[in-house]
Amino acid sequence: MIRDITIGQYYSTDSVVHKMDPRTKILWTLLYMVMLFVVDSIYSYGVIIAFTAMVIKISHIPLKYILRGLKPILFLVIFTAFLNLFLVDEGKVIFEKGIFSITEGGLWLAIKMAVRITLLIMGTSLLTLSTTPTVLTSGMESLLSPLKKIGVPVSVFVMMISIALRFIPTLLDETDKIIKAQTSRGADFENGNPIKRIKAMIPILVPLFVSAFRRADDLAVAMECRCYNSDAPRTSYRKLEFGINDLSALCFGIIMVCTLVLIEVVS
């Protein structure tokens, strides 16, 4: 399960998506998230699914690798769909037995929420899978730089995001080692009722938090030894360049948004 988490990890390959400016990919991801929560018709979801499939294809990231990242949230998707399926009472009744009933509105909302969460995880995963943490934080700092004029500590915020992204693979490896160590001592994380499984997670969470705090303390000491100062003027080794591919992507995004708005109006 731990190995199935792909958010925050980078998949190295040579593709057009990997070479794009990180600012373009960040803006596209934000736009993608907004579109997912705005559209409502089946035709709009079809367009977004086709677009997601196209991006996955040109990114050269295996679909199997991206789908593997959906395993940790599979329970959340099923649980959300289940709630909407039985608790929403709209439209014609399709199935009814006792106190349980399924309506057309509940069925459509359950499908819509499941597809929405799935596409949301896949879209956000593509951002981190195609962008290294260093480049990603540089793009975020560039986009947020206007906030410096009103006193927002953008550099500190971006540094926190950068450290968090860098430590995700490290914490996943640490969790995997702790699980294997506890399993070798007889711990059982697979069997039993939900309450028993939650209690079984305590021997994992306690050493994981201790290890995380220890790493954070070591990192703070290392930054102090290197005289890190968040208020000092910063320079960047990597200069971001906005190319023709980025302009084409943004223009395509505008066209896609207009298309989805037109589909929503017509439908």
Image: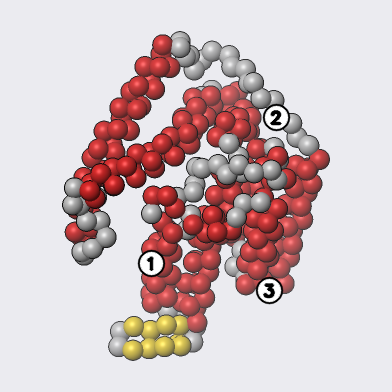
Numbered tag placed on residue 267 in the rendering: 3
Residue at 75%, 47% (x, y): give it: 249
Residue at 68%, 74% (x, y): give it: 267
Separation (CA) of disc 3 from disc 2: 41 Å
Please tell me how crowded label 3 is: few (under 14), some (14-19), or many (20+) other residues with Cα within 10 Å.
few
Q: Earlier in the sequence, mark 1 or mark 2?
A: 1
Q: In this view, does 60 lie to the left or right of 171?
A: right
Quadrant of the rendered image containing residue 144? top right
Relative depth, front residue between 18 and 106: 18
Residue at 68%, 64% (x, y): give it: 50
Q: Is residue 225 visible?
A: yes
Q: In this view, does 266 lie to the left or right of 121?
A: right
Q: Earlier in the sequence, mark 3 or mark 2?
A: 2
Q: Name the residue under label 1.
A: 79
Quadrant of the rendered image containing residue 62? bottom right
Q: Earlier in the sequence, mark 1 or mark 3?
A: 1
Q: Is residue 117 left or right of residue 173?
A: right
Numbered tag placed on residue 240 in the rendering: 2
**Where does the N terminus fall, quadrant-wise?**
bottom left
- Locate residue 130, reporting x and y percent: 61, 44
- Locate residue 229, reporting x and y percent: 48, 14
Please tell me how crowded label 2 is: few (under 14), some (14-19), or many (20+) other residues with Cα within 10 Å.
some
Residue at 60%, 30% (x, y): give it: 138
